[in-house]
Amino acid sequence: MQLSIDLETKDIISLISQMSLNELEKVKNSLVERELYFKEFKKDNVQNIISDFKKEDYSNDFLTDLEEGLKKSSIYK
């Protein structure tokens, strides 16, 4: 069975603030085990991304828009 709920950041912080040190340690260990901690983003070359989309037969207009959008995006600046 899988349960999904939407929580806002403030709700998560509130729940964490109520945890004991032992509970926090368990959460930390679980995050590390699942590699859910922050990692440095490894961005791919824009041309590699475009090439992948070309293989899926996206239109030239879409590919042009995608390339221009990626080049302007904050992650590539």
Image (tube, helix red, strand yellow):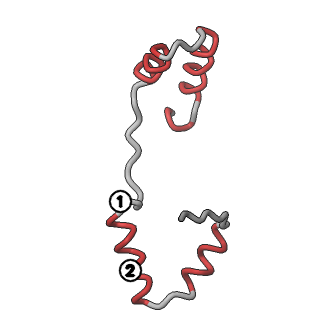
* Residue 33 lies in quadrant: bottom left
Residue 63, quarter of the rendered image: top right
Read off the residue under disc 2: 26
Secondary structure under the numbered disc 2 in the rendered image: helix
Q: Nearer the viewer, residue 77 or 2?
A: 2
Q: Amino acid at mark 2?
A: Lys
- What is the spatial separation of the Cα atoms under label 2 and label 1, in whole angstroms? 14 Å
Point out residue 36 in the picture as x, y percentages from the top left corner: 41, 60
Disc 1 packing (10 Å; few <14; some 14–19; many ≥20): few
Q: Residue furthest left?
A: 33
Q: Is residue 54 above or below residue 11?
A: above
* Residue at the image point whose x is 35% and y is 59% from the top: 35
Question: Is residue 3 placed above or below 71 in the rendered structure?
Answer: below
Q: Residues within 10 Å of mark 2 (few under 14, many from 20)?
A: few
Residue at the disc numbered 1: 35
Element under disc 1? loop
Q: Earlier in the sequence, mark 2 or mark 1?
A: 2
The amino acid beneath tag 1 is Glu
